[in-house]
Image (spheres, grey):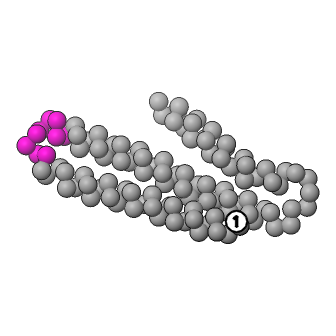
Amino acid sequence: MKKIVSVMTFAMTWLMTSTAFAQNWGGGGGGGQTDKSWYALGAALAIGLPALGGAFGQGRTAASALESIGRNPNAADKVFVPMILGLALIESLVIYGFIVALILQGKIV
């Protein structure tokens, strides 16, 4: 399973970044296009990696919390608040990645 996730992550990264570098492979003298392609790559990675990591983190958090509640239903009150706090912190990291991607996108135009 881990190998499949690694291959899929590599494939998605390659597909997303290939368009960023396509403008340099046209053969013309791009004059500053290289910087823009690096900003595009940075923006793609700045939103893609935090979203991927946040999705995995939130999935594991929810699965662990639900499993512990399933094993001990009386602990639901003690598990719920830390779970929500953890989910909020994970989501804040994804939002920071989104903000960085927006800043980098502004440098492309």
Q: Residue at x 56, y 58 (%)?
A: 46
Which of the 4 image quarters holds residue 10? top right
Q: Residue furthest left?
A: 74
Residue 9's place in the image compared with 106, above or below, is: above
Asked if residue 107 lies left or right of residue 23, the reply is left
Asked if residue 21 lies left or right of residue 103, the reply is right
Residue 108's place in the image compared with 82, above or below, is: below
Residue 21 in the image: x percent, y percent? 76, 52
Residue 75 in the image: x percent, y percent? 11, 45
Q: Residue at x 29, y 40 (%)?
A: 63
SS of the residue at dot 1? Answer: helix
The kind of residue tagged 1 is: Ile
Q: Which residue is mark 1?
A: 108
> Could you tell me how many numbered marks the image carries?
1
Which of the 4 image quarters holds residue 85? bottom left
Label 1 packing within 10 angstroms: few (<14), some (14-19), many (20+): some
Q: Residue at x 19, y 40 (%)?
A: 68
Residue 2 in the image: x percent, y percent? 48, 34
Asked if residue 63 lies left or right of residue 10, the reply is left
Magenta segment: does it hold 109? no
Give the prevailing secondary structure in the magenta stretch.
helix
Q: Residue at x 80, y 63 (%)?
A: 33
Segment colored magenta: 68-76
Q: Residue furthest right?
A: 28
Magenta segment: does it hold 74? yes
Residue 36 in the image: x percent, y percent? 74, 63
Asked if residue 93 lies left or right of residue 84, the reply is right
Residue 69's place in the image compared with 93, above or below, is: above
Q: Say which quadrant the C terminus sits in.
A: bottom right
